[in-house]
Image (cartoon, rainbow, N blue to C red):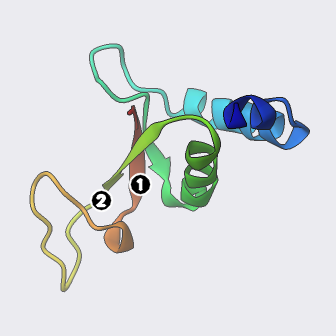
Amino acid sequence: MYADKIMNTEYYQRLKSVGNKIAKKYVSTKYETSIAKGIPIKYLNFYKEFSKKVKPLRIRYRGNSKQGYSRPTSFCHMAYADTFAIYHR
């Protein structure tokens, strides 16, 4: 019910349009489980807002180890991330 109200708004339509353009630019190959990967961290707030409104997305942060931060092989803190990947929830 709440999702239906949001999906019909102009704001949501703009979010969807911009989100689709960004996701298509960074789309993953068909052999991977992610929807898109390598998305610059500057788009993070946009995807968090979109995900909370309607679309159930899971965001995983990606990045290299940096001076003072040695990351585990399968995890990266948001504060040290360079990019992120999007998965279906």
Residue 21 in view, yes or no: no
Q: Where does label 2 land, which residue?
A: 63
Q: Are marks 2 and 1 in contact (CB under 8 Å)?
A: yes
Please name the amino acid that badge 1 sits on. Answer: Thr
Q: Is residue 43 visible?
A: yes
Q: Say what secondary structure mark 1 lies in.
A: strand
> How far across and down, in percent of the image, does residue 12 sit?
78, 39
- Looking at the image, the residue that sits furthest to the top is 30
Q: Nearer the viewer, residue 73 or 86?
A: 86
Secondary structure found at label 2:
loop
Return the disc, 2 or 1, that comes first in the chain's sequence.
2
- Label 1: few (<14), some (14–19) or many (≥20) C-alpha neighbours in 10 Å: some
In screen coordinates, is 71 left or right of 52? Answer: left
Kindly report the distance in space between the C-alpha atoms of the residues bearing marks 2 and 1. Answer: 6 Å
In the rendered image, residue 59, in percent from the top left (x then y), is placed at 40, 47
x 74%, y 28%: residue: 4
* Disc 2 crowd, CA 10 A, few/some/many (<14, 14-19, 20+): some
Q: Which residue is mark 1?
A: 83
Total number of numbered discs in the rendering: 2
Please name the amino acid that badge 2 sits on: Gly
Picture coordinates of residue 79 (x, y %)?
Answer: 37, 74
Q: Which image quarter holds the N terminus?
A: top right
